[in-house]
């Protein structure tokens, strides 16, 4: 190489800019090595990013036009961007300047960092030289991370995934509304455990107009049983329409409003993390859904990258925070890896497989705890990695959800989390049978404007950032301004903190409710799904959630004074309320209600293999004492 050529190569590597004598073109031109497979892959990605704003050409085809100012050796060392004013940049600077022509918000971020962030420009130059000098290794690494397909590094698309996700979300909404509808009378109806109408009236008298903001629910207009049924029925109809992809934006908006209304009205019975998660996912899905009335096979509506990010960020927070809170809760069982030795026996509604999992040796339970932490703390970060690593993260999270679902009845939680996982699998993972998936389908339709989405993303990241901070430091105080702002968002339950199994329950107390006509002979009320008869196998009931049975598990962990709803339940049972008794498996007093009712507390333990073979029992139990002494309706002895 001649001295002049060496100087130009050195000049290109240093990323200084020069002006050539060739006539400027109508568009900037990026010149690259057309014989380098690594370059070809990334040029396809850049072409997709900047669209028609920049022309691309291999130096083998256009090098002669600029031979007087840029030698072939310079072109072979680095990409060059030749702009319309005749200025030339090479290497990393050329890439940053080329990307700055892209239409997306933040396209010029790299160029801005080069100019304003100390050390960024030298680091980018060094990184570019390292990659350019080892292209074969870089190409092999690209294949390993993104795949061997020539379009693997192109911007992933999520058109097929969006359709499948929204249909699955419609199914989850259907399950949620149907499940609650079958219990609504007994839980919050006029003759239910916690009637919603008097509760709302009491809050309105206490808080005045502020109650409407603190408790956003349509039940302020009507809290009668018929209206509650109407909300549930409307939710089921809208869920079916969402599954069919009919007016998805409108359906999602109304589904969110309906489920928020029922969640608020449901009080303690609708206060589970998956209810909050469904509301958050449902709200962000409004921004992801296509603007159309009926589905189209020919055209696709654009997928908002901001809305897509918000949903993936929700999954990240759900899983990562669940791992963090276990370590910051102060529960030693998570640190000494014994937590899962308790978990299978003490979870609210275990399945028969939980009994078998409980029999596994301690070393396997400890190993399973390590794997659990590896997934919850590590896999969420993989969701934002290149495709193949992203698939590893998705597979890990899906396997965790499957194992949780096999050993416990957690309503629609596992299905909803799995649906969120699907959003990290781009369309290339879901090829259509018999034909190749188009990387860039025909697009038609509107999308939520960035003027709405970008500020929303900023708010979500800011607020959720402090929620993450609280996961690490539970006692930390929020800055006053942010705390006040979050207080206005919190009632809508659509931006939440999460923390599954923060503290492991070490024992399994169970409440047995008994009634008597004479105060001497007592008969037991059998619940449909919660533990009672030791010989009764643990149920498989998910995705349905028996909310009274779940609440009985929480009540057993607390004193009766901390569970005021429980006395209401006993009172309704003494009254013989058909809607409340309909939530139970058996009513030992079908003709008339008992005169007295009481609750006893038992400690339950899984049997071992020998005990089960000998007795046929899944559980053994010991009485712990009285949970609630005998009571009767006022006015009776």
Image (cartoon, helix red, strand yellow):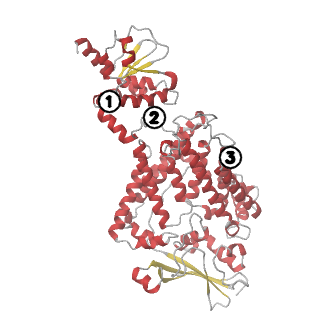
Can you tell which mark lies on residue 91?
Answer: none
Disc 3 marks which residue? 246
Q: List the single residue furthest toward the front.
A: 434
> Element type at marker 3?
loop
Give the residue drawn at x 39%, y 66%.
339
Nearer to us: label 1 or label 2? 2
Left or right: 458 with respect to 97?
right
Residue at mark 2: 154
Q: Earlier in the sequence, mark 3 or mark 2?
A: 2
Question: Which residue is at 41% across, 47% downward?
Answer: 382
- Residue, disc 1: 123
Label 3 to label 2, Cα distance in Å? 31 Å
**In front: mark 1 or mark 3?**
3
> Mark 1 and mark 3: span between their CA atoms?
50 Å
Quadrant including the N terminus:
top left
Give SS at disc 1.
helix
Question: Relative to residue 312, is residue 330 drawn left or right?
Answer: left
Mark 1 → mark 2, Cα distance in angstroms:
25 Å
Q: Is residue 590 above or below residue 62?
A: below
Residue 410 percent location from the top left of the image:
53, 64
């Amino acid at each position: 190489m001649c001295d002049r050529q060496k100087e130009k190569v050195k000049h290109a590597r240093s990323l200084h800019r020069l002006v050539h004598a060739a006539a400027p073109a109508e568009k900037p031109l990026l010149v690259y090595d057309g014989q380098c497979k690594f370059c070809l892959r990334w040029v396809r990605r850049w072409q997709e990013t900047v669209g028609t704003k920049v022309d691309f050409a291999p130096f083998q085809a256009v090098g002669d036009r600029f031979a007087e100012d840029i030698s072939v050796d310079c072109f072979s060392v680095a990409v060059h961007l030749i702009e319309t004013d005749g200025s030339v940049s090479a290497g990393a600077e050329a890439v940053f300047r080329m990307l700055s022509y892209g239409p997306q918000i933040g396209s010029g971020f790299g160029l801005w960092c080069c100019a304003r962030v100390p050390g960024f420009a030298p680091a980018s130059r060094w990184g570019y030289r390292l990659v350019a000098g080892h292209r074969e290794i870089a190409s092999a690494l690209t294949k390993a991370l993104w795949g061997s397909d020539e379009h693997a590094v192109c911007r992933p698309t999520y058109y097929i995934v969006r359709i499948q996700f929204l249909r699955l979300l419609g199914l989850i909404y259907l399950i949620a509304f149907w499940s609650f509808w079958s219990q609504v009378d007994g839980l919050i109806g006029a003759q239910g455990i916690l009637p919603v109408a008097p509760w709302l009236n009491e809050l309105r008298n206490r808080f005045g107009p502020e109650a409407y903001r603190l408790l956003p629910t349509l039940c302020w207009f009507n809290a009668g049983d018929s209206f509650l049924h109407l909300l549930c029925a409307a939710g089921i109809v809208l869920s079916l329409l969402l599954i069919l992809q009919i007016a998805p934006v409108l359906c999602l908006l109304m589904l969110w409003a309906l489920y928020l209304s029922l969640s608020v009205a449901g009080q303690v019975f609708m206060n589970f993390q998956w209810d909050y998660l469904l509301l958050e996912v449902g709200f962000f899905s409004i921004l992801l859904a296509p603007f159309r009335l009926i589905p189209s096979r020919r055209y696709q509506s654009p997928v908002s990258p901001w809305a897509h990010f918000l949903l993936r960020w929700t999954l990240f927070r759900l899983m990562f925070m669940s791992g963090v809170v276990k370590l910051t809760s102060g529960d030693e069982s998570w640190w000494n890896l014994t937590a899962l030795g308790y978990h299978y026996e003490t979870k609210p509604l275990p399945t028969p497989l939980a009994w078998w999992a409980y029999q596994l040796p301690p070393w396997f339970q400890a190993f399973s705890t390590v794997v659990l932490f590896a997934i919850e703390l590590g896999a969420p970060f993989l969701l934002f990695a290149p495709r193949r690593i992203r698939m590893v993260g998705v597979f890990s999270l899906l396997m965790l959800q499957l194992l949780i679902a096999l050993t416990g009845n957690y309503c629609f939680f596992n299905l909803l989390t799995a649906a969120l996982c699907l959003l990290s699998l781009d369309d290339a993972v879901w090829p259509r049978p018999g034909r190749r998936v188009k990387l860039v389908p025909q697009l038609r339709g509107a999308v939520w404007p960035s003027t709405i989405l970008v500020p929303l993303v900023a708010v979500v990241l800011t607020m959720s950032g402090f929620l993450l901070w609280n996961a690490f430091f539970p006692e930390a105080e929020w800055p006053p301004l942010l705390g006040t702002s979050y207080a206005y968002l919190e009632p809508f339950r659509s931006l939440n903190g999460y923390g599954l199994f923060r503290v492991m329950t070490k024992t399994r107390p169970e409440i047995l409710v008994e009634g008597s006509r004479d105060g001497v002979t007592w008969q037991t009320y059998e619940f449909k799904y919660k533990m009672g008869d030791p010989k009764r196998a643990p149920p498989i009931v998910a995705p349905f959630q028996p909310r009274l049975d779940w609440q009985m598990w929480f009540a057993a962990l607390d004193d009766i004074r901390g569970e005021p709803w429980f006395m209401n339940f006993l009172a309704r049972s003494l009254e013989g309320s058909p809607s409340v008794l309909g939530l139970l498996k058996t009513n030992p007093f079908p003709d008339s209600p008992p005169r007295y009712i009481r609750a006893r507390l038992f400690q339950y333990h899984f049997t071992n293999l020998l005990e089960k073979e000998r007795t046929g029992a899944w559980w053994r139990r010991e009485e712990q004492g009285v949970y609630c002494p005998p009571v009767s309706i006022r006015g009776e002895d």
